[in-house]
Image (cartoon, coloured by chain):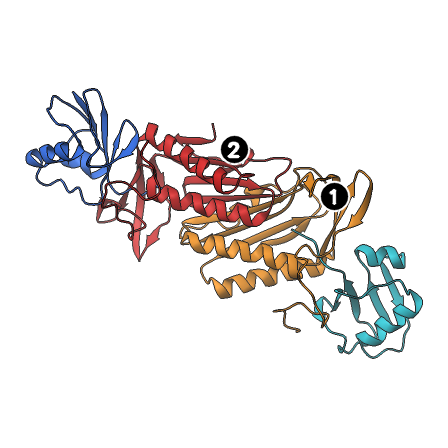
Chain colours: A cyan, B blue, C orange, D red
Amino acid sequence: MINLLLFANFQEVIGSKALSLELNVNNILELKNYLLSKYPELDFNFVMVAVNEEYATDETVIKSGDVVAFIPPVSGG
Amino acid sequence: MINLLLFANFQEVIGSKALSLELNVNNILELKNYLLSKYPELDFNFVMVAVNEEYATDETVIKSGDVVAFIPPVSGG
Amino acid sequence: MNFEITDKPIITQDIINKVVDRNAGAVTTFIGTVRELTKGKKTLFLIYEAYEKMAVKQLSRIGDEIIEKWPNAKVAITHRVGKLEITDIAVVIAVSTPHRKDAYDANEYAIERIKQIVPIWKKEHWEDGETWVGNQLETEQYPTGKPEGVSHD
Amino acid sequence: MNFEITDKPIITQDIINKVVDRNAGAVTTFIGTVRELTKGKKTLFLIYEAYEKMAVKQLSRIGDEIIEKWPNAKVAITHRVGKLEITDIAVVIAVSTPHRKDAYDANEYAIERIKQIVPIWKKEHWEDGETWVGNQLETEQYPTGKPEGVSHD
């Protein structure tokens, strides 16, 4: 099970702050492709991703229990 | 009469915060020369001068009633 | 804690107090406030949202980066979340160093890094609508999905 | 008054309050404090002295210079005189601007100018003596008796 955290416009597109997904995906790229198939309006351009609170890449391997967060362009400060 | 204001080490060398001098001097340079003749240990290197609270130069003309301040290297902040 | 996310008003002096030091001659603070006008458009209020746990981690990482670059610096950063009105404080960064130049440089480094790597978002509420503000740097792109200068560990 | 010399402790927030503005998104402050160690030598306390009337004029001139360079800036500066203990605040500079870069630059400009043109002196009291501190910039020389960039009017 992958725990997904959603913020800002991602939260609004998906309509949820957090999702737990029973998925067979190996890495972030596969997770993105799965989400795109369900929410075609998602735009991953300039969106960072974190696995267990550390920045990750499309190639980062994910396993059951991981917390994956999509980080749209930040605007703190 | 020239009103002289003294600060920091100038105050200590001359032993006074302020002096009123009845002097026949035309400009700052002449005033400096007069003071040096009385207080040879004065060092005007890097010392700025103000006439009536505005920075001035050796050539600045002074007249009776003016307030002249010697400004040793500043160290505020 | 020198690195915090809070939903309460920030008292600048509290953040300054965290970095005061007998051997610091200089303290700089940056106070980011909610501005009413942006390019002529009027903001009514803002909502800040954070991925809090990660945001604290990233703020703390910025602190580590600063100590590495300016070993005598002390740093504290607090960022607020929730609804903020015009002139409310969104962020306070305080840096102390023995000499002043470092205090300016390290402080400016902190705000630049916040705008790159700390997962906090603001939603502007205008008179005629609302929008999540994208990357304020605008020039930044993360083709790899990872910001520059952030190691993956 | 945005430019002051005081013989009382400086409350940083009071100076910040003078520059808060609905259209300022950034406030920077510089807080100069009394440091215990300078090149390994231990300071016990400091005495600051000012040519007060002229110092206020020069601080205000620095404010004018800043407005000329950064037209949307607001500036407030208070410098303390008298006896100051370790960690006491000698000076607070607050600058607000719409955008952050200007707030850092204008603030740093202010402290550099203070160290050039504002008639304030400090006397360091060490364990083994006391001395009036010369120009902290050390590199500055005024062969004409007049600092650079100060017009004579």
Q: Identify the residue at image location x=11%, y=24%.
A: B23
Q: Residues within 10 Å of mark 2 (few under 14, many from 20)?
A: few
Q: Position of residue B73 (x, y in %)?
A: 26, 43
Q: Identify the element where label 1 is drawn.
A: strand
Tell me how many marks there are.
2
Specify whether residue C79 is in view.
yes
Q: Which residue is mark 1?
A: C46
Residue D14 vs C81, above or below: the answer is above
Q: Which residue is mark 2?
A: D14
Q: Quadrant of residue D92?
A: top left
Q: Amino acid at mark 2?
A: Asp
* Apparent side of residue A47 relative to residue D57 in the rendered image (left or right): right
Q: Amino acid at mark 1?
A: Leu
Q: Identify the residue at image location x=41%, y=44%.
A: D111
The residues tagged by marks 2 and 1 sit, at their Cα atoms, a distance apart of 26 Å
* Apparent side of residue C140 relative to residue D91 in the rendered image (left or right): right
Q: Position of residue A77 (x, y in %)?
A: 65, 51
Q: Residues within 10 Å of mark 1 (few under 14, many from 20)?
A: many
Q: Identify the residue at image location x=20%, y=29%.
A: B61
Q: Quadrant of the C terminus of chain C?
A: bottom right
Q: Identify the element where label 2 is drawn.
A: helix
Label 1 chain ID: C
Kindly identify which numbered label has been placed on residue D128: none
Q: Position of residue C38 (x, y in %)?
A: 69, 43
Q: Position of residue D73 (x, y in %)?
A: 54, 39
* Apparent side of residue B23 relative to residue C7 in the rendered image (left or right): left
Specify whether residue D33 is in view.
no
Which residue is nearer to you in this view: C70 or D116?
D116
Which residue is nearer to you in this view: D87 or B33?
B33
